[in-house]
Amino acid sequence: MNYNTERGRLEMTEYGRNVQRMVEYLLSIEDDKKRNEQAKIVIELMGQLNPHLKNVEDFRHKLWDHIIIMSDFKLQVDSPYPVPDRDVIFAKPKRIPYPQSEFRHRHYGKNIETLIKKALEMDDEQKRQEFAEVIGNYMKLVHTNWNNETVNNHVIIGDLERMSSGVLKLTEDSNLDLLAKEKRGPAHQRDNDRSGGGGKRRSKGGQQRNKNFKPRHKK
């Protein structure tokens, strides 16, 4: 019995061991014409084993690339497409440096910094003030989610003023609860209505009273 650990490596497991053997057989064919004919047959079989590739753009191009990869880039055939390059296919992605920046108010997130910077670039004072109120709404929503508790408007107004170097100032009557209300939605409002006595009365046992209900007396 031959175990998989004793067999050669499968370059592309989705095609299975038998297709890998067929590709290895192609490498042993010395006649170029016969090798090309047999390679086309293997390509057709690979397409039948993976019908989902037909929904992919240039799926036949992918099949030819795969058969070259399965041969460890040794198969010499007249491919209708450019032969894939090993260094390009198996190239390691470049390391993306993690952005390092000092940010005192991390609970607001990096996006707040970007929004404040955009507001400071506005020339129209009225639009800048309106945008500042939008930022304040977002800051309060993020702050509440981060700390899982409500926050006083004075905290938001103070943080926004400090983060904008004193340029963006909100007044005490600024409405900073618009986003929070939209997040809670109508379901939250219905819960408040029920808790405020708007719903039907319930008995001590938690069940709804029925005016037609008559208790059964024991005989």
Image (cartoon, rainbow, N blue to C red):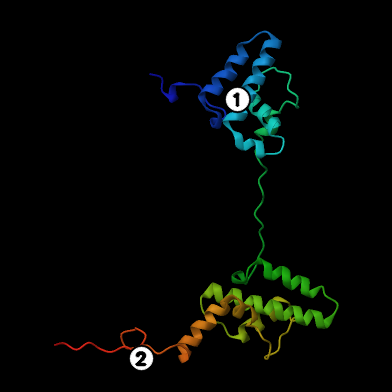
Q: Is residue 74 among the parts visible in the rendering? A: no
Q: Nearer the viewer, residue 218 or 170?
A: 218
Residue occupying the point 83% across, 82% down: 125
What secondary structure is found at the residue carrying circle 1?
Answer: helix
Q: Is residue 61 above or below residue 100?
A: above
Q: Nearer the viewer, residue 186 or 95?
A: 186
Identify the residue position indicated by label 1 in the image.
45
Q: Quadrant of residue 64?
A: top right
Residue occupying the point 71% across, 78% down: 134
> Extreme right residue here?
123
Residue type at mark 2 is: Lys
Residue 24 placement (x, y as % from top left): 58, 17
Which quadrant of the rendered structure holds the N terminus?
A: top left
Q: Is residue 214 above or below residue 161?
A: below
Of tags 2 and 1, the one toward the viewer is 2
Residue type at mark 1 is: Leu
Residue occupying the point 65% across, 33% down: 90
Local crowd size for mark 1, using a 10 Å CA cut-off: few (<14), some (14–19), many (≥20): few
**Separation of residues labelled 2 and 1 (CA atoms):** 74 Å
Q: Quadrant of residue 158?
A: bottom right
What secondary structure is found at the residue carrying circle 2?
Answer: loop
Identify the residue position indicated by label 2 in the image.
211
How many marks the image carries: the answer is 2
Local crowd size for mark 2, using a 10 Å CA cut-off: few (<14), some (14–19), many (≥20): few
Could you tell me if the residues under marks 2 and 1 are in contact, i.e. CB atoms within 8 Å? no
Q: Is residue 6 above or below residue 94?
A: above
Residue 112 placement (x, y as % from top left): 68, 71
